[in-house]
Amino acid sequence: MMGTRNEDTNIGHQPPVITRKHFFQIRYSFFKLTVKFKAANLPIMKLKYFTFYCVIGLLFFSCRTSDDSTFPRRENISESVYASGLIKALYQYQAFANANGTVQEIFVQEGDTVKKGTPILSIFNESARLNRESAELNRAYADRQANQTKLKDLEISIAYSKTKHQNDSLLYERQKRLREQGIGTAVDLEQRQLAFENSKTSYEASKLRYLDLKREIDYNERSASKNLSISRALESDLVLKSEVDGRVYALLREKGEMVNAQTPLAVLGSDREFILEMQVDEYDIVKIQRGQKILVSMDSYRGEVFEAIVTKINPLMDEQSKSFMVEGVYINVPSVLYPNLTLEANIIIQSKENALILPRSYILNEKYVITTDNDTVPVQLGLKDYQKAEIISGIDEKTQVIKPGK
């Protein structure tokens, strides 16, 4: 469980000191004991042992008095939320290829800087190559230029049908005029009319066949082009390319290994910008806001503290860890960073200067303190961190307190 944490404090804990006053008290006590032992005719050796134990007891009492009591004092205090996490490169991601096959060639090495679109590795897949070649053949067969002869043949048929239709129309009109003059028979007129209608139907049918063939050729050409584009796209998936300007942080497969669409192949990300990914306990998440200051420490930079700010709070809780992902960016960036470096962070919730501070070990039940007169005094607390608490009211800087239970 993650909780509140801050820096160590040594308020009121000083090494025991034997003052000049203590020394003369011990010396005077030893003198009086010597006189009494001689008056009682007791051996001096017993006096030495007795004196030794008295001195030890005095020192022990002095140590306990020094360590177990203290005075409140003025200093700065801040309340913070502890979080642990990792360093991530900006835009860091695992790269996958939408293809099955074997790793054919690797074009980069781990640590190389790359541009967006730079090939990382290639995958060999025979079926993808054959599908692409087949699509190219279908596209060539469905090409409009390759079907011009069919269109030309129908255009000739349309022209012939049109001419025949026009001729039959003239003959039909001529036969009607002759029939009106009493020349020719009704059968001749009917034959001319039938020939005219047949040629008209043939002409209309040839135009429809031409339109149908043209639509079919257009459809086949577009369909073949789409299939070819799909085949080429699938074949291009056999080459994994970088999606960012950055660095290759890891190559997860070697040449000759079998891979599929669910196999991660590489880890890439920015080589200049990094983010902090921190896990904050659900108990503390309501205190976190964007823009809050973060104090970051890392094992790679022992003894150094870096400043950062909160930039993002992911709103969905991880059900397993009962924590939220909080992201931040550095204000003062370390000189060298690598992804997955561990970090510990204190997210500053609020701070106060020149506050009256007392170690929390001297506070009983977060409500009371015990003075050296054995009085139990109620106090009101303000800001608190892992070791210290602000005293708002109840005691002042002149009040000496002792640890509860001592």
Image: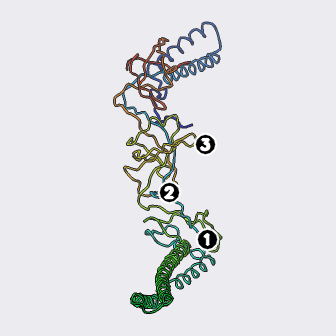
Q: Which residue is mark 1?
A: 254
Tell which of 68 and 125 is nearer to you: 125
Helix, strand or loop at disc 1? loop
Is 144 located above or below residue 312 in the figure?
Answer: below
Pair 1/2: label in front: 1
Amino acid type, label 2? Pro
In whole angstroms, how far apart are the C-alphas of marks 1 and 2? Answer: 22 Å
Give percent across and percent down for residue 333: 39, 53
Give percent across and percent down for residue 136: 54, 82
Amino acid type, label 1? Glu
**Applied colour scheme:** rainbow
Residue at the front extreme of this rendering: 182
Query: Going from the N terminus, do you reach mark 2 or mark 3 first?
Result: 3
Q: Which residue is mark 3?
A: 320
Helix, strand or loop at disc 2? loop
Q: Is residue 268 left or right of residue 273?
A: right
Pair 3/1: label in front: 3
Query: Going from the N terminus, do you reach mark 1 or mark 2 first?
Result: 1
Is 186 located above or below residue 372 in the figure?
Answer: below
Give the quarter of the image for residue 378.
top left
Query: Going from the N terminus, do you reach mark 3 or mark 1 first?
Result: 1
* Residue beneath the point at 41% across and 39% down: 289
Helix, strand or loop at disc 3? loop
Dot 2 and dot 3 residues touching (CB under 8 Å): no
Mark 1 neighbour class, 10 Å CA radius: few under 14, some 14 to 19, many 20 or more: some
Q: Which residue is mark 2?
A: 339
Is 128 located above or below residue 303 in the figure?
Answer: below
